Image (cartoon, grey):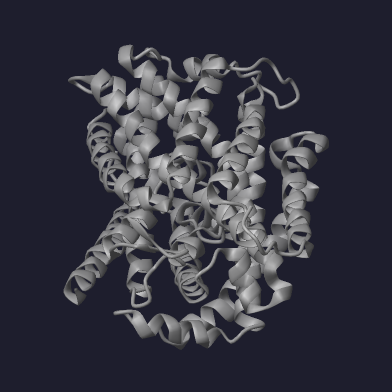
Amino acid sequence: MGLSLSAVAMLIFGSVVLYGGLAYFLYRAIKAK
Amino acid sequence: MVDNIAKAEYWNSRFAFVMAAIGSAVGLGNVWRFPFVCYENGGGAFLIPYFVALFTAGIPLMILEFSVGHWARNAPPEAFKKIGKRFEWAGWWAVLVPFVIALYYVVVMAWCFSYMVFSLDLKWGSQANKFFNNFLGNTGSAEIFGTISYPVVLGLIVIWLCVFIILYKGVNRIGKIVAITVPLPTILLIILTIRGLTLPGAIEGVSYYLTPNFSKLTDVNVWLAAYAQVFFSLGVAQGIMITYASFLKKKSDITNNAFIISLADAGTSFLAGFTVFSVVGYLASSQGVGITDLGIGGPTLTFITYPTAISLLPIAASFFGMIFYIALLTFGIDSAFSMVEPTVSGLNGKFKISKAKATGYMCLIGFFISLLFTFGSGLHWLDIVDHFIANFGLVMIGLVECIILGWMYKLSKFRIHANKTSDVKIGIWWDFLIKYVIPLALCILLIIAIINNITNPYLNYPWWVVIIGGFAPCIAIFLISFIFMKIKSTKEDI
């Protein structure tokens, strides 16, 4: 059994929003220094 | 990390504040509570309300609390008093709720403390579930009290002592501690996640975790649990972030910090979900049952899945097990003292009780009340108190904060205040969320959930159990908040 399409979509959404978002705001914080 | 400048305390650097706030936000709420709340509320079905709650309420409220704390430069009771004398009770309410959470939070840490010792010889063997119940002396019911678990009491003494020492020494020690306690558990969580994902059957667990069941989205309890989890985990609606932000220097960034802390916190929860659900999938597959038929859940879930994952590590399982539980303890300790700190700061601000004395009193009171959860029925009482304090106590504070600050005060003042020093500027959308979206959502959820809880007692516990464990703490906190407001402030130091 593999992951369903909706599970893959959730995985991508969660990763991009949370980890991508975190990376973006950390980048902004470092740049602002 | 904070300097004592005259009477005011400030964080030394932005890094110190961000690490301390992440340390406070990231804790057992992510690695212990999130997985079991997610499991109980349908796995993937829970993630959608969770993300909605995070972006519509969690992050906006964190920005609000940072602005209030930074503007007022005081603990929540004094901060709300600055907004309007009649609102002081809201500040007390906001600091007393996390103190009640701390009462059972330290018990979970005491379990972790015992498991750290058990890791030496992987004492739980192949039956982590049975072992956990034996360890607690679980009576299987909230009505049969059973006997005290002395290993848990020992753990409690150690944890409360640690909280006392850290707070007694002042907030300036916090930054040094969190510099180690934040990254270490994250690394270990990643190691366990990798091991979990390589287990047979793990994919079924992950599939349950990620696949959204859209029919669950009509269940109000799932939405309420999502908002409560976001508040519990981020540390908003608990006075913690107001207190921490009050130590920030004048030109400190507010909005960007709020985003970093919130996303780091939610990211940790999301990661912990993979660790736990991969092991849940493995357990279901090895027992030949479905994920929902495993017969585990609630606060015990992670005390079954993590030990199982540790035992299955190919090398140095004992070593990694011990390090993992040390890491969990360090994860938890940041949150534990941050839950006690607002009450201590509040008592210091209002009654001028020295921070050292206030810390001593609160830790001692906390220790004795925590003992109630060390009995054989403690697990059930812990579950009941957690359900009501998180779902109703925290959510109500979130609602009250929005009403007071959004409707009875000039909210735009806080937006302008945050924008003045922040790299990322917030717009009118933030006012709209605080004034309309969050109060409306929380109001509807609370009304329906209260009706549900009255018509169907939580987990079918007897009424007297629900009243004592659920309603009584919420009502007691509410009354104490008003009593504290009515007592006149002391002018001289005690």
| Vertical relation: B74 (above or below) B365 | below
Can residue B294 be seen at all in this image of the molecule? no
Which of the two residues, B25 or B159, is positioned nearer the viewer here? B159
Quarter-of-image position of residue B250: bottom left
Pick the front one: B41 or B137: B137
Instruction: Tell me what residue is drawn at x 32 percent, y 47 percent.
Output: B178
Quadrant containing the N terminus of chain A is top left
Q: Residue B286 at what x, y percent from top left?
A: 36, 21
Which one is nearer the viewer's eye here, B494 or B407? B494
Compared with B469, B136 (above or below) is above
Nearest the eye: B370 or B487: B487
- Which residue is located at x 45 percent, y 73 percent? B70
| Residue B184 in view here | yes
Q: State left or right for residue B135 relative to residue B200.
A: right
Quadrant position of the C terminus of chain A in the picture: bottom left
Query: Where is residue B89 drawn, in percent x and y?
Result: 71, 65
Tell me how many marks there are. Answer: 0
Q: Residue at x 41, y 80 (%)?
A: B418
Q: Quadrant of residue B493?
A: bottom right
Where on the picture, by quarter, is residue B27?
A: top left
Q: Viewed as shown, does residue B131 lie left or right of B179?
A: right
In this rendering, the answer to whether B321 lies above or below B479 is above
Report the side of B138 relative to B10 (left or right): right
Instruction: Give the image location of residue B8, x and y in percent.
Output: 45, 65
The picture places residue B259, in percent across and down from the top left corner, at 35, 67
Q: Residue at x 51, y 86 (%)?
A: B413
